[in-house]
Amino acid sequence: MSILVIGATGTVGSLVVQGLAREGADVSALVRKAGRPLPAGVRPVIGDLTDVASLREAMVGVRTLFLLNALAPDEVTQSLQALNLAREAGIQRIVYLSVINADLYTGVPHFAGKLAVERMIETQNLPVTILRPAYFMQNDIGIQTVIETYGVFPMPIGAKGCEMVDVRDIADLAVAELLRRDRAPHPLPRETLEVVGPELINGPAAAAVWAQALGREIHYAGDDVQGFEAQLLQQGLPGWMAYDLRLMMSGIQQFGQIAAPGAAGQLAQRLGRPPRSYGAFVAERLAPR
């Protein structure tokens, strides 16, 4: 029996595969094409979330499943198909990557999609750990050049703030949950975990972190979500995705991304160490390579 990772080549999923491999787990990774680089010992399984037959084949002999669905117009269909096929295959150990505060962002397509998947998990009482991470610190890798060149933090995250989390902490928690469920003699009860960093960071605070690390003034560029959407379109993102991300930014400005009290402490307890801070992430990005 093995652990199947769906979403194995993305930012989080690739780290989950690496972490499981380091732990000596029996891991297979769903990939769309042969030849994708994977850690030693990890078996590629060719398949696609839109291809039911390939998913059925991929789940044969699988004991435990990690489900991460990338942003897609038909994300709900893909995720619900995967979970239903997992149930049909007798898989009773699952970790699903959702998003924090999905119940508040009802107008944001990919948040609403993840909430629909959570509702299926809850109503059918599936044996799943639902991970609900906040804003990824690694989102800001793509704007580092803008910050350093123009002296502005351009991500319009507003004033409410996000309890930003490092994707490595998300992946480490996912690995721990997959192994905990995989090694349990019986399916474990459903559980939802909010995955956040140790501090609340808003737009001006993020700019201040970069300013301190760079030793010069960095300004927050403001809350212009229309300009944000236009920039995404210029970068080549499809219109539906750029608009979805614009709506997400509007939601962050309205609600923030804030967990229930104690979530960061719970993450630290499960990881056996404190979660990484945004300041540590920025310092690492600026360290000489």
Image (cartoon, rainbow, N blue to C red):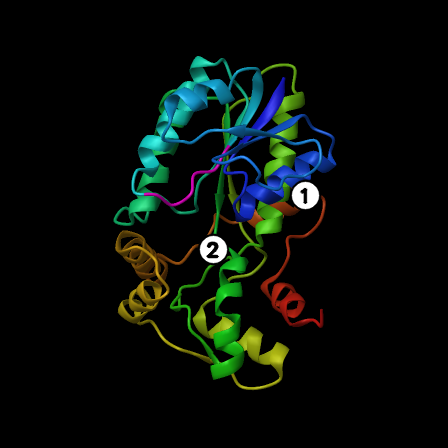
- Outermost residue on the front side: it is 35
Which numbered disc covers residue 271?
Answer: 1
Residue 143 or 182: which is nearer the viewer?
Answer: 143
The quarter of the displayed image where residue 70 is located: top left
Question: Residue 133 at what x, y percent from top left?
Answer: 49, 47
| Residue occupied by mark 2 | 135
Image quarter in which the C terminus is found:
bottom right
Of tags 1 and 2, the one toward the viewer is 2
The quarter of the displayed image where residue 34 is located: top right
Residue 213 or 81: which is nearer the viewer?
Answer: 81
Look at the image and say whether residue 68 sits in the magenta stretch: yes
Residue under the point 57% across and 38% down: 35
Residue 259 or 288: which is nearer the viewer?
Answer: 288
Residue under the point 30% across and 38% down: 74
The residue type indicated by label 2 comes to Tyr
Establish if 110 lies above or below 253. Answer: above
Q: How many marks?
A: 2
Residue under the point 36% across and 28% down: 80
Establish if 256 lies above or below 28. Answer: below
**Mark earlier in primary sequence (1, 2):** 2
Question: Residue 180 at what x, y percent from top left?
Answer: 65, 28
Residue 266, can we see it?
no
Which numbered disc covers residue 201?
Answer: none
Residue 171, can we see it?
yes
Question: Residue 2 at what x, y percent from top left?
Answer: 62, 22
Q: Which residues fall within the magenta stretch?
A: 67-72
